[in-house]
Image (cartoon, rainbow, N blue to C red):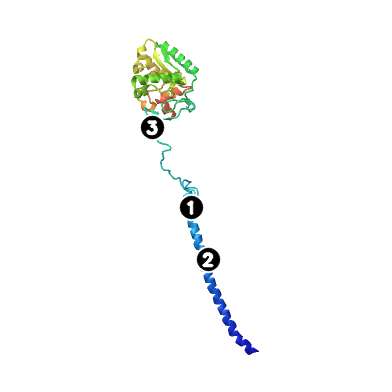
Amino acid sequence: MNTRTNRKSPIVLIASISLLLLLAILGSIYYKYEVVDEKNQAVENHSNKSETDAESDEGADPNLNEPTPTTPVEKPATNENPPQEVVNGYIVGQNPAVDPTYVNGILIVNKKIPLPSTYNKGEDPAAKAAFEKMAAAAKLEGFELVAFSGFRSYEYQQTLYDRYVNRDGKDAADRYSARPGYSEHQTGLAFDIGEKGREDLWLTSEFGESPAGQWLVNNAHQYGFILRYPKGKEDITGFMYESWHFRYLEGDTAKKIHEAGVTLEEYLGIK
């Protein structure tokens, strides 16, 4: 009985080894054709997905999946906000004003800061009263002052400006006449002042050299008025020297500006 068992043992051993070898061969074939092919397919699928994603991202936000930078990044210049073009002090293509502009409570109008075309409050009562008080004081000194031009509507300023342009050309007109919407006269706070009996000096620089003009320069601030466009300040105010144009300001602002020897723009810190 033991002899028979020993004879079968080599046969069983050989069969077991053969089975193991067969299993190893089958496993190798499976790995080659299934596992390796699966890995290759995965790589190929990933490559195709990357190409597809790259195509679909065209025109998308490039920073969508990028980390937020820790420091500001300067963007390249674009044509969305082109530099402002200034002609004769005016910003070309400036949008119409929607509301009047106040700086430190003071209404400001110049070549770069317009009023809405609908701003039409007429002559300011406080400014008119201040002028009459000033004129009364000047009369005691022998000067009869006349406010020969006060409030002007947007429409009237348009007519006046067009008249000057037709006569002298746009470049010349822009030096002494405001375009509609850019005139202080539209505020109702400005007056062109001259002396009665000396109409030949009205709207001239010579008025500023006359005794009446000198009295105004030296005393107008006491009544709330400033010489709006002084000599040598055209690069700041945008207008030539106008010895006759005075602007009313409430409170003691006119005195402060006169004592500092500056323009309204300089006093308010605007350009």
* Alpha carbon separation for disc pair 3 and 2: 69 Å
Image quarter of residue 269: top left
Callout 3, which amino acid?
Glu
In 3D space, how far apart are the residues under numbered discs 3 and 1 (Cα atoms)? 45 Å
**Amino acid type of disc 2?**
Val
**Residue position for label 3:** 85
Per the image, the residue denoted by label 2 is: 35
Query: Tag 2 or tag 3, which sits nearer the N-term?
Result: 2
Q: Is residue 214 above or below residue 72?
A: above
Quarter of the picture containing the N terminus is: bottom right
**Crowd tier of the residue under label 2, counting other residues whose Cα lies within 10 Å: few below 14, some 14–19, many 20 or above:** few
Query: Circle 1 — which element?
Result: helix
Q: Position of residue 97 (x, y in %)?
A: 47, 27
Assign a secondary structure to mark 2.
Answer: helix
Residue placed under numbered mark 1 in the picture: 52
Residue in the picture at 51% in, 64% down = 37
Instruction: Kindly report the distance in space between the C-alpha atoms of the residues bearing marks 2 and 1.
Output: 26 Å
In the rendered image, residue 233, in percent from the top left (x then y), is placed at 36, 26
Expressed as whole percent of the image width and height from the top left, the position of residue 217 reads 39, 19
- Residue placed most toward the observer, 172 or 1: 1
Three-letter residue code for mark 1: Thr
Query: Which of the marked residues, 3 or 1, is nearer the chain's N terminus?
Result: 1
The image shows residue 99, relative to residue 198, as above or below, that is below
Identify the residue at image location x=58%, y=79%: 16
